Image (spheres, grey):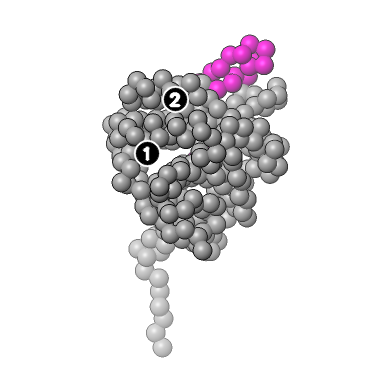
Amino acid sequence: MCSTELDPSSESQLDFDYDDWRQQAIDGGSIRSVDLQNGSNGWSSPPGDLFCLRGPNYLSSRQKVPSGDWSLLPAGVDWLRSSRRLDNILSRPDNRVASALRRAQSVGRSLKSFLFAINLQVPGRECHSAVFYFASEDPIQPGTLLHRFVHGDNAFRNSRFKIVNRIVKGPWIVKATVGNYAACLLGRALVCNYHMGVNYLEIDVDIGSSAIATAISKLALGCVESVTIDMGFVVEAQAEDELPEKLLGAVRISQMEMSAATYVAPAT
């Protein structure tokens, strides 16, 4: 009778496969991770200090200050297309990011991780989705503004979910147009649908629900290969004890090619 021992190199590979699920998610996206300064047709993670958010004395001084580090860690970006709008992507069995986390958790690793996804749904003859994934390594702390947002009702979420944009590079018309909406409460300007799972929250932002947002997205997508944009996501602070604001996460999209979108079959 012979015994079978796990090869040390295989054990190391197993540890990498399951402990580093977030790196797998980053590496496997439909658009690749690129250099922050010089990358193109990809995404990167801009530092928080590029975004000015409400400071500790904002309610009295109206002063904004550079944000610190993000609350959540980057976990990849997808650029997807389909014949119909893609909703609740994290619930799909073929979603690569949720699958990577499930595989890690199936062997008892990353049990505390929480996924946060923002799905910007772009209307058109083909529906597109830009999906930004973020994750926490530990449970979100009770009592924090982020915890209240995750576990709050949709009215609370709509009153707090904010995007902060920066055009890094692009034609003047895009800079001027997007600059007018540099900070926007998405939950009030657009229809946002919130999908809560056991270990995730996904926000589906229906750009087609606003004529202005649809026009801006068409303008930006028309010259997308020459545009680099930073997008930061924030739970807006509206009370003294919620300040200063902190980024949930941020992503830089650098001169993306429309053809980079991966086709996804609509849910049955």
Residue 233: give x, y in percent of width and height: 53, 33
**167 falls in the magenta region:** no
Q: Does 66 lie within the magenta span?
A: yes
Q: Residue furthest top?
A: 61
In the rendered view, tell whether residue 90 sits above or below residue 169. below
Relative to residue 131, is residue 28 drawn left or right?
A: left
Residue annotated with mark 1: 43
Indicate the amino acid at tag 2: Val
Disc 2 element:
helix
In the displayed structure, would residue 95 be above or below residue 244? Answer: below
At a point 30% along the width and 35% down the height, the residue shown is 225
Q: Residue at x 56, y 47 (%)?
A: 202
Q: Magenta segment, which residues?
A: 53-73
Q: Is residue 240 above or below residue 268?
A: above
| Residue 90 % position (x, y) | 53, 53
Q: Earlier in the sequence, mark 1 or mark 2?
A: 1
Residues 263 and 254: in front is 263
Label 1 SS: strand
Is the residue marked by circle 2 packed among few (<14), some (14-19), or many (20+) residues within 10 Å? many
What mark, if any, has residue 178 been given in the picture? 2
| Residue closer to the observer: 243 or 81 | 81
- Residue 46 visible in the snapshot: no
**Residue 207 visible from this viewpoint:** yes
Inspect the image, locate mark 1, and give the three-letter code of the amino acid beneath it: Trp
Q: Nearer the viewer, mark 1 or mark 2?
A: 2
Residue 150, labelled with which disc?
Answer: none
Q: Residue at x 39, y 22 (%)?
A: 175
Q: Where is residue 3 drawn, in percent x and y?
A: 41, 81
Quote the CA–CA distance across marks 1 and 2.
19 Å
Assign the N terminus to one quadrant of the image: bottom left
The answer to which image quadrant residue 145 occupies is top right
